[in-house]
Image (cartoon, rainbow, N blue to C red):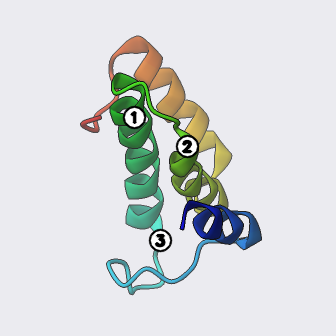
Amino acid sequence: MAENIGEKIKSYRTAPFDARFPNTNQTRNCFQNYLDFHRCNKALSAKDQDVAPCDWYQRVYKSLCPMNWVSKWDEQIESGTFPGKI
């Protein structure tokens, strides 16, 4: 099963359709996948588990989000001023 998921992750080039975000504007989808990536990393790292499943969220947010947003959010996380709950 894990091998199948790994193959699927590698084969995606852009974010697939997500029924939670049916509209053309994908801003919320971008932000949600950014949060999910960091939450996934935090949760799996706390349990000393492999964080490879989190790569899916990273691929999606890198596909959807402008890189200047991502760099701004990364800076906010480092400085402790990020508005999202991770």
- In the drawing, what numbered circle is on residue 44? 1
- The answer to which of marks 3 and 2 sits earlier in the sequence is 3
The label nearer to you, 1 versus 3, is 1
- The answer to which of marks 2 and 1 sits earlier in the sequence is 1
Residue 16: x and y in percent read 57, 79
Tag 2: amino acid: Trp
Residue 71: x and y in percent read 60, 33
Tag 3: amino acid: Gln
The label nearer to you, 2 versus 1, is 1
Residue 65: image quadrant is: bottom right
The local secondary structure at tag 2 comes to helix
Residue shown at the point (38%, 63%) measured from the top left = 28
Residue shown at the point (58%, 50%) measured from the top left = 58
Gap between marks 3 and 2 measured at Cα = 13 Å
Which residue carries the number 2 mark?
69
**Relative to the observer, which residue lies in front, 4 or 75?**
4
The local secondary structure at tag 3 comes to loop
Which residue carries the number 3 mark?
26
Residue shown at the point (55%, 43%) measured from the top left = 69
- The answer to which of marks 1 and 3 sits earlier in the sequence is 3
The local secondary structure at tag 1 comes to helix
| Quarter of the rendering occupied by the C terminus | top left
Question: In screen coordinates, is 9 left or right of 40?
Answer: right
Determine whether 2 is above or below 58 in the image.
Answer: below
Residue 80: x and y in percent read 34, 16
Q: Give neighbour class at mark 3: few <14, some 14-19, many 20+ (Cα, 10 Å).
A: some
- In the drawing, what numbered circle is on residue 25? none
